[in-house]
Image (tube, rainbow, N blue to C red):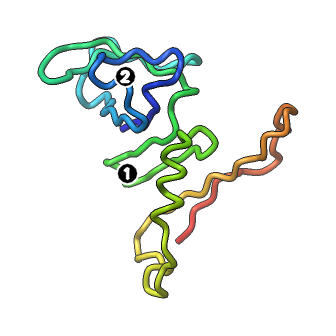
Amino acid sequence: MIHLDARRAGVVVPEAVRSETHLRLNISYRFDPPDLAIGNWGIRSTLSFAGKRFTVAVPWSALFAITSHVMKEFWMFPDDMPRELLEQAAQSTRPLSSEERVAKPGALLREVKCDPSDGHPAKPRSRRHLRLVK
């Protein structure tokens, strides 16, 4: 499942969902899509919306998270999240209890470290920037 801001430039989705700040689309080779294309620009595929087929186009710049239901993993790109979602998350946060702070056995958590945007091109990283937290 991809999570995207449907209002971003280049996104092609049905009119009924074009104003969504958090649109979720199920994209999978398991659905045997006839035209799924994943490339440098982004993702293109024909999907079903309310029983009608529609060819969607999602540039990478509009995507801010990916969820794998099969592998139970989640990747998030906070720098690309819509401002409204960040504000909503900030308003709904509360301190976690000690039980909530401890990861449950078998849970997979991935951390994505983002460099602050200072207008300079990102420097190549010498080591991996994702790590598994158990």
- Residue denoted by label 1: 71
User: Disc 1 vs disc 2: which is toward the camera?
Assistant: 2
Q: Are marks 1 and 2 in contact (CB under 8 Å)?
A: no
- From the viewer's perspective, tell me whether residue 67 is left or right of residue 55: right
3D distance between C-alphas at marks 1 and 2: 29 Å
Q: Quadrant of residue 118?
A: top right
Which of 58 and 6 lies nearest the eye of the viewer? 6
Residue at 53% of width from left, 17% of height from top?
9
For mark 1, give the secondary structure. loop
Q: Residue 18 carries which label?
A: 2
Which of 34 and 74 lies nearest the eye of the viewer? 74
Residue at 35% of width from left, 17% of height from top?
45
Q: Which mark is residue 100?
A: none
For mark 2, give the secondary structure. loop
The x, y position of residue 48, in whole percent, is: 20, 21
- From the viewer's perspective, tell me whether residue 112 is left or right of residue 29: right
Q: In which quarter of the image is residue 3?
A: top left
The x, y position of residue 104, in whole percent, is: 41, 76
Residue at 56% of width from left, 67% of height from top?
133
Which of 84 and 68 lies nearest the eye of the viewer? 84
The x, y position of residue 131, in whole percent, is: 63, 59
Which of 117 and 71 lies nearest the eye of the viewer? 117
The answer to whether 107 is drawn above or below residue 76 in the figure is below
Badge 2: how crowded within 10 Å, few (<14), some, or many (20+)?
some
Q: Quadrant of residue 54?
A: top left
The x, y position of residue 37, in whole percent, is: 42, 16
Q: Quadrant where the N terminus lies?
A: top left
